[in-house]
Amino acid sequence: MKIPTRIFAGLSRTNYLATLSHLVLGLCAGTLLIFGSAIAAEPVPLTQQTIPVSNAVEVRKLPRLNDKSKQLQLQEAKEQFKTFNVIDVSKLHFPFGPFIFAEPRITFNDAGRTLCLYRNNFFEKSVRAFYLYDGDSIQRSDLDPPFVDEFGHYYIDRPAAAGTYTLTVDCDGKQYTIPVNVPNPAQFTIPDIKLNNAPPVVAHFEARQGGVNVIGAKKNTIVTLAATVSDPNGDALSFAWGVNAGKIISTSANTARWQLPNSGGLNFAYVLVTDGKGAYVERGVIVSTDGNQVAGSQAVPATAISDKVPRADHFLTFFSTKDRHNYLPHASLGADSKMGSCRYYTALGAAAGCDDHGNLIGPLLTFAKWKKQWGLDNPAAGSKAIYANKADLNLQRNMHGISNANGTAYYVCNYPRVDNLDIGTNLDNARNNHNLVACVAMEYSPTAGVSGNQPFTKFFVFAPSGGLLQSVNLDGRGEKYIPGSCVVCHGAHDEFARINENGSTSPDLGALFLPFDLDNFAYSSAAGLTKADLESSLRQLNKLILNTNPNQTITDLIAGWYPAPTSTFTSTFVPAGWTAHKKLYEDVVKPHCRTCHVAMPKNFEGDDLSFPTFDEFNKFNFQLGDRVCGDGQGIARRRYSMPNSLVTFNRFWTSPVASATLRQHLIDQGEFQPTEVCNPPH
């Protein structure tokens, strides 16, 4: 049954925010269940709906539901929301149609986007407002995002009785008091909190040595990190520092001394600046320790569309920031944490345990030991290729793969891309092992006591030193912990969100190996490393994936690329389920979705996120409009969350055809009205 999507076209607010903070509907047998109380739910003809709208009203449409999801909604309502007051539901088009509800909310109205909402697990920082009414003995907060959205709306519970209250709100230590008149607890509004606060401005962040800015320095030497920062409001600023290698040995206001590691490669340092009023700004520097001192200032990234979605956890965090089942109001727990990454490695036997801060306790697995276990310490072993994955991470890569009695394993060493995207670039970093960021190892093998001793996919990330890394920066948005930064593209089972810090999460996440899409790569012009030279190796690397746990979409894709054992890569292949919609596939799915979505799971309703056919893709039109086009109908903080790779996101929005083709598809399928647009964030 198709969801009616444009019932409320005339409303003054059509954000359709998915803010179910104090209401979960259990839809069952034609009855609307609100916390166990049943009322008749009569269908209302769309043309006859008259719905009162106030500034506090939000509109939400539900995706298609089946009996299982109805039962889950009811069960989770009882478990998670039994303490909240029932709110007033105006009109409901049953079954599965839009409904509206009025909720009080606190809104931090601030053009500087100081929303009292900041999360950065690398700095162990999680900031959000809490509130209490006068007379409360316990401070209360929203349950966690999505009950606070990226626009600064906190959806709160309501007093049990009418009256005049004082609402006290704490924003990162700054308190506000608001007199609130509540004539009717079922529906009332709260005036916006005017923060009038601008975030700090970082003019420069540099690494200095011997009085000059440097981008390279000798191993085990000391550089000074210096941040030039101002605050438009004149607020006192605080600084926090973090590094992925080496250590901070001293700090003083806006400077810190960083002892670099005694190993080569690229090293990352970060500063987090706050004004004490909920505004946070993070910046990073990169220093190579592959040789002697190299003078130079930190590169300033070119302006990109992704700058309009500046949150640190916006990209490469889909599983760990998703809302369970896509629309139910479960609190997302944020990206994986340091303790979570330690628990993951420990469960795989790569570490002996964790200390109280999430640091790894040895003995630890090293890259040299891992390669030896798989026979990949022999340079001639397995299949290998050097290329740049220009379509998603834009890194130079040195890829190796092998199958043997242990199972199947790959490792890829990653280097920054320094040349343009044209074919024929030299890829000198990968060829010469220069400026190494990290090496990522994946294996399909059993671990004793896990998943019935059956093989499963595992991730290990190694530093240039060869030691285990708990986090990695792959897109310039800061460190993200393992395994969340891996499964964001390699997939996981539908129930996975993040590794529990208590160690209860199985390390068998249901992840898959990704096929090698030769159209997404740039190649060297050096002899032996051209695309033609690498055809055989890349074909073999693709064939090795069939020895792991590929889903049917991946299996069919590899078979289509290589219809015969010695075929060259068939770039024009279109799966059978897409042949009638070839333009949509070639303009949108193939270049901007397929790389990661081929490894995505079926959701709990059985809809296939790997998009094997047009019909499966078509089931997600609601999410496409919201998460890609940002049309504002779904959960606000999930807007523009796809593509979830920063590089692919920018490629999609700079493509001359991608957004237009997707928009036309949504219009053709009735998800968009002809007047609606699919525009980039602004």
Image (cartoon, rainbow, N blue to C red):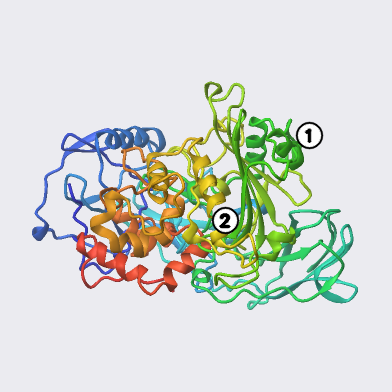
Q: Specify whether residue 320 is in view.
A: no
Element assignment for label 1: loop
Q: Is residue 224 left or right of residue 355?
A: right
Q: Mark 2, residues whose alpha carbon is within 10 Å: few (<14), some, or many (≥20)?
A: some
Residue at the spot x=26%, y=62% of the render? 666
* In front of the other: 568 or 481: 568
Residue closest to the far front? 566
Disc 2: which residue: 534
Q: What x and y, as percent, mark residue 39? A: 18, 38
Q: Mark 1, residues whose alpha carbon is within 10 Å: few (<14), some, or many (≥20)?
A: few
Q: What x and y, as percent, mark residue 485? A: 57, 49
Question: Which disc, if any, is residue 362?
Answer: 1
Which of the two discs, 1 and 2, labels the residue nearer the N terminus?
1
Q: Is residue 321 left or right of residue 24?
A: right
In the image, what residue type sits under mark 2? Answer: Leu
Q: Specify whether residue 541 is in view.
A: yes
In the image, what residue type sits under mark 1? Answer: Gly
* In front of the other: 645 or 249: 645
C-alpha gap between disc 1 and disc 2: 39 Å
Q: Quadrant of residue 415?
A: bottom right
Residue at the spot x=44%, y=50% of the render? 567
Q: Quadrant of residue 682?
A: bottom left
Q: What x and y, as percent, mark residue 95? A: 18, 44
**Which numbered mark, 1 or 2, is in the foreground of this view?**
2
